[in-house]
């Protein structure tokens, strides 16, 4: 049965990258527990607009948990309190009537705040552009289907490929490390025959770019794994580190 709840929201408002920013308090009344978190923000924004105030800026696109656009810290947790859930999949049934909810943008040196809850995640795009692709000629679909791939490798590659690049791993890491994201993108290619050809070059280039973008290093806190909405495993980081050592010590690439 649908319930209605009333909430108090404390939301980070920041007019632009150079604005100091401040927490502001809003009231969210008669929110259906069937709504998603983003739909709740839509209602709040509608009320703000009708009252002549500027709506809260936040990122969203597919609202089906696959695009990686949505994301905010909800009560100090990336994408909120539910495990394996993006912000658009977080439903208001997980909150109680009278709750106060803190909503903040991702916090990381590499993710500059654009406005309110919107941050610039183009640093991820630069890491991908540095080597997160296959450029060799792998033929057409029939050729790919003729290459045997061990089932275990295919499963691990698919698990890594689930990363949607939302940035929750960076936001939840005390070092603002992007190693879970980078390792997932490296792993899903390196595990497949088509990606092995450029594996050494790829791991060196992507890790170099990751450092250049200002992300921190991994210190095995495992917060990234705990908060990842796609439950990407940190064994990808170990696989990436092994690939890096192999490439740094034994390949012709620098």
Image: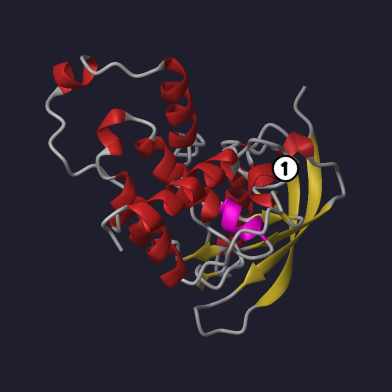
Above/below status of 135 relative to 159: below
In the displayed orientation, state which residue is furthest to the right.
98
Q: Quadrant of residue 32?
A: top right
Q: Nearer the viewer, residue 29 or 233?
A: 233
The residue that appears at 25% across and 39% down in the rendered structure is: 197
Q: Nearer the viewer, residue 238 or 27?
A: 238
In the image, the segment drawn in magenta is: 167-173
Q: Quadrant of residue 44?
A: bottom right
On the rendered structure, is 188 left or right of 136? right
Q: x and y percent of residue 144 in the render?
A: 21, 21
On the rendered structure, is 95 left or right of 254? right
* Element on which disc 1 rests: strand
Instruction: Identify the image quadrant of the C terminus.
Output: bottom left
The residue that appears at 48% across and 28% down in the rendered structure is: 156
Q: x and y percent of residue 72 in the render?
A: 61, 56
On the rendered structure, is 98 left or right of 50? right
Q: Main secondary structure of the magenta part?
A: helix
Above/below status of 205 relative to 23: above
Q: x and y percent of residue 16 in the render?
A: 50, 78
Q: Nearer the viewer, residue 202 or 90?
A: 202
Circle 1 packing at 10 Å, graded few (<14), some (14-19), many (20+), is many
Instruction: Identify the image quadrant of the N terminus.
Output: top right
Is residue 68 something one can see in this rendering? no
Q: How many marks?
A: 1
The residue that appears at 29% across and 37% down in the rendered structure is: 195
The residue that appears at 39% across and 65% down in the rendered structure is: 208
Q: Is residue 37 magenta?
A: no
Above/below status of 167 relative to 231: below
Is residue 140 something one can see in this rendering? yes
Snapshot colouring: secondary structure
| Tag 1 residue | 31
Q: x and y percent of residue 210 in the render?
A: 44, 63
């Amino acid at each position: 049965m649908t319930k209605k709840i009333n909430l108090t929201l404390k939301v980070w408002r920041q007019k632009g990258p150079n604005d100091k920013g401040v927490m502001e308090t809003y009231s969210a009344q008669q929110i259906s527990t069937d709504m998603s978190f983003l739909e709740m923000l839509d209602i709040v924004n509608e009320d703000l607009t009708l009252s002549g105030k500027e709506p809260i800026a936040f990122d969203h696109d597919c609202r089906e948990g696959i695009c990686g656009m949505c994301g905010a810290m909800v009560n100090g947790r990336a994408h909120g309190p539910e495990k394996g859930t993006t912000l658009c999949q977080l439903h208001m049934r997980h909150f109680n009537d009278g709750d106060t909810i803190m909503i903040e943008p991702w916090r990381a040196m590499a993710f500059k705040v654009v406005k309110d809850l919107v941050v610039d995640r183009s640093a991820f795009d630069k890491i991908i552009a540095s080597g997160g692709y296959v450029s060799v000629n792998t033929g057409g679909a029939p050729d790919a289907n003729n290459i045997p791939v061990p089932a275990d490798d295919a499963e691990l590659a698919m698990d890594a490929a689930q990363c949607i690049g939302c940035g929750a791993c960076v936001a939840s890491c005390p070092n603002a490390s992007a190693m879970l994201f980078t390792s997932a993108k490296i792993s899903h290619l390196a595990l497949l025959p088509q990606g092995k050809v450029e594996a050494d070059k790829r791991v060196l280039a992507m890790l170099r770019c990751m450092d250049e973008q200002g992300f921190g290093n991994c210190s095995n806190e495992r917060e990234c794994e705990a908060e990842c909405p796609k439950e990407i495993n940190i064994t990808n980081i170990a696989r990436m580190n092994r690939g890096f050592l192999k490439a740094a010590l034994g390949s012709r690439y620098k």
